[in-house]
């Protein structure tokens, strides 16, 4: 039986969190249905007519179907900069957790340094230009990988330390080579951490505005977040189109979260090694 | 067909030497048990044979092949771990077949071998389950199945039964003996449980602090222990040790006496002794019998009546505590004095440095 204050707090918390999370979302949806004149008022009113379809068509076709290009770019960027850190961070975590050498201290320091040292934009652009990756999709992929690696490594290493070493040894006796041990035994057991990583990293990269802004100039390189600038300028902002655009680019992260949310919970319970 | 030969095998972690030169011969098809207290190096020795620990010095031969630097998968061994080490994300079928899959065995061969192993271990109905859906005993079966499916020359067991409850342990122990009988493979088994060692082994290797104390059949170790450590370790309850003084020496016997025991002549090798030396005779609790003529008299301090036998703790005149196991049921009072006798030819005399002086 729960105590009275905790029930009371729970009853308050539900409407408060609903207000915080649902009201902005409702505002986006409502505005996306309005026409330009009504949207400019920026108020919480019922739309005068059903303008959503017109808005969507206009958003998608603006500037020579830029949104489609942006979706393709963002997808490539997100998939690449989620897949690579997942595999590499798990590998690094595996080696760090399993093999004790005198270099471990230095490596751990470098990982922490990767988390702590703030990224500098100008030198990064200078470096990208030097290796010919400025304004190409590969550059930001590498940058997002570099930003994502340290945290993923720390997550993976901590989790791998809880997997009994005897599993590795049993596999080695069964004839597994190091890559077999990693890909067939360790990586599948890391699923809960991998899901967490995928969700956090993909939402972060997909919604990243500043990095593509700095490192991906040019219309052909636009990512979805940059398309928001199409409808917002100093003197003229089409709020109905802006919010339609926001609505469209919110859908993919939402799907990722809804799909993997189930797996986060399922993965946590399946990860039990001994019982 | 593979025996095993260990030639002055050594292992050190930095400065610390944990295996200090082990020499051992294992014939093909033998069931060898490594036994010793915690930290004596028995698991390390097994892992060196498996190839999971590097060998610092000496040679390891499996069959006729020098295996010091051979990968575990090429040594022809299979190992069962104490914690079973089943792959939690695979079904029982995949767990058992994992080694064959890695070796690239065709699907039909793999299927046949996995089902055959499941049949031998009576776990065909478990093949589709995940390890988390199995009980401890079933998991152990899967671990053993994973070993036998590889048809190794040598089976290695690292305390395989210590996570099971007592009743199941006895069952699995008998099944392992049966498996050894059926497969005829060489088996090396690590345990700290003396009863397990005595009941399953063809040959017991007693280890202490990285040194082999004695190698022999269970009964040999029980009746003719090489030193105080083996005498104290093998046999339950523990052997009684009494410090006595040498009175006189015969051609192949020694007469000893002391505060606790009147003059008694025990068969032993007297060559290294002289009258007046201190020696330690060891007497098994089961060799003590209550006789009014007995020359070992103690005061009863604890009685455990089990029906078929009675465990009696005694306090001797010197203050030392001893244990006797008497046949049948005895009604004894705490504090009463109890005279005990023993057959001198079943006692073992140890010299000052703990080495047994067996009659030649």
Image (tube, coloured by chain):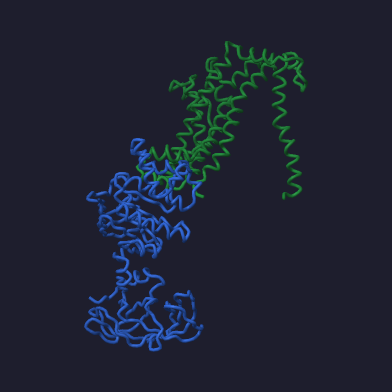
Chain colours: A green, B blue
Taking the spot 40% from the left edge, 57% from the top edge, the residue there is B159
A117 with respect to B73 (left or right): right
In which quadrant of the rendered view does residue B346 lie? bottom left
A36 with respect to A184 (left or right): right
Compared with A231, A9 (above or below) is below
How far across and how far down the image is residue A31, in percent?
A: 72, 20
How far across and how far down the image is residue A202, in percent?
A: 55, 29
Compared with A162, A199 (above or below) is above
Compared with A4, B40 (above or below) is below
Taking the spot 31% from the left edge, 71% from the top edge, the residue there is B225
In the image, B281 versus A19, the foreground residue is B281
In the image, B64 versus A90, the foreground residue is B64
- Is residue B14 in sight in this rendering? no
How far across and how far down the image is residue B180, in percent?
A: 33, 55
In the image, A121 versus B359, the foreground residue is B359
In which quadrant of the rendered view does residue B258 lie? bottom left
A182 with respect to B31 (left or right): right
How far across and how far down the image is residue A246, in percent?
A: 64, 22
Please state, as top left, top right, bottom left or bottom right, where the C terminus of chain B lies in the image: bottom left
Taking the spot 42% from the left edge, 58% from the top edge, the residue there is B171
Q: How many numbered circles does the render carry? A: 0
Farthest top residue? A64
A272 with respect to A3 (left or right): left
- Is residue A209 in sight in this rendering? yes
In the image, A190 versus A73, the foreground residue is A190
């Amino acid at each position: 039986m729960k105590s009275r204050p905790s029930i009371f707090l729970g009853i308050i918390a539900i409407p408060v969190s609903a207000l915080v999370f649902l009201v902005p979302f409702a505002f986006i949806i409502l505005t996306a249905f309005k026409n330009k004149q009504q949207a400019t008022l920026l108020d919480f009113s019922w739309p005068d007519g059903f303008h959503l379809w017109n808005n969507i068509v206009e958003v998608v076709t603006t500037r020579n179907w830029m949104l489609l290009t942006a979706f393709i770019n963002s997808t490539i960027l997100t998939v690449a900069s989620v897949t690579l850190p997942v595999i590499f961070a798990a590998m690094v975590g595996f080696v760090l957790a399993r093999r004790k050498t005198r270099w471990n201290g230095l490596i751990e320091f470098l990982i922490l340094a990767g988390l702590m040292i703030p990224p500098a934009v100008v030198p990064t652009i200078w470096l990208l230009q030097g290796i010919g990756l400025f304004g190409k999709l590969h550059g930001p992929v590498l940058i997002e990988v570099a930003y994502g690696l340290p945290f993923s490594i720390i997550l993976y290493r901590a989790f791998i330390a809880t997997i009994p070493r005897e599993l590795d040894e049993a596999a080695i006796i069964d004839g597994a080579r190091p890559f077999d041990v990693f890909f067939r035994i360790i990586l599948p057991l890391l699923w809960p951490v991998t899901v967490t990583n995928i969700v956090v990293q993909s939402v972060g990269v997909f919604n990243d505005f500043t990095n593509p802004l700095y490192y991906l100039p040019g219309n052909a390189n636009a990512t979805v977040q940059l398309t928001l600038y199409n409808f917002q300028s100093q003197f003229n902002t089409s709020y109905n189109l802006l919010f339609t655009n926001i609505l469209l680019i919110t859908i993919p992260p939402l799907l990722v979260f809804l799909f993997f949310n189930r797996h986060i919970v399922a993965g946590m319970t399946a990860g039990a090694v001994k019982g | 067909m593979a025996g095993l030969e260990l030639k002055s095998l050594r292992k050190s972690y930095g400065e610390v030497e944990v295996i200090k030169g082990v020499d051992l011969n294992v014939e093909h098809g033998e069931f060898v048990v490594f036994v010793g207290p915690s930290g004596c190096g028995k698991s390390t020795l097994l892992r060196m044979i498996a190839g999971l620990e590097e060998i610092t010095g000496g040679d390891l031969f499996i069959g006729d092949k020098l295996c010091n630097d051979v990968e575990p998968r090429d040594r022809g061994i299979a190992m069962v771990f104490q914690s079973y080490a089943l792959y939690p994300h695979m079904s029982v079928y995949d767990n058992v077949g994992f080694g064959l899959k890695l070796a690239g065995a065709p699907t039909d061969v793999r299927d046949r071998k996995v089902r055959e192993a499941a049949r031998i271990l009576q776990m065909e109905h478990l093949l589709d389950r995940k390890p988390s859906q199995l009980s401890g005993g079933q998991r152990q079966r899967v671990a053993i199945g994973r070993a036998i499916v590889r048809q190794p020359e040598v089976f290695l067991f690292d305390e395989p039964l210590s996570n099971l409850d007592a009743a199941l342990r006895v069952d699995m122990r008998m099944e392992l003996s049966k498996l050894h009988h059926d497969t005829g493979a060489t088996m090396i088994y690590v345990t700290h449980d003396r009863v397990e060692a005595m009941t399953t082994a063809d040959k017991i290797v007693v280890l202490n602090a990285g040194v082999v104390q004695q190698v022999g059949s269970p009964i040999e170790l029980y009746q003719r222990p090489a030193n105080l450590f083996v005498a104290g370790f093998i046999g339950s309850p523990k052997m009684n040790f009494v410090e006595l003084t040498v009175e006189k020496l015969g051609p192949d016997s020694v007469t000893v006496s002391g505060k606790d025991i009147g003059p008694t002549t025990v068969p032993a090798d007297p060559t290294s002794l002289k009258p007046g030396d201190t020696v330690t005779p060891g007497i098994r609790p089961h060799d003590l019998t209550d006789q009014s003529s007995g020359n070992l008299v103690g005061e009863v301090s604890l009685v455990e009546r089990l029906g078929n036998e009675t465990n009696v703790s005694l306090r001797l005149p010197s203050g030392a505590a001893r244990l006797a196991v008497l046949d049948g049921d005895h009604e004894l009072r705490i504090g009463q004095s109890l005279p005990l006798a023993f057959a001198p030819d079943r006692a073992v005399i140890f010299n000052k440095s703990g080495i047994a002086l067996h009659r030649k």
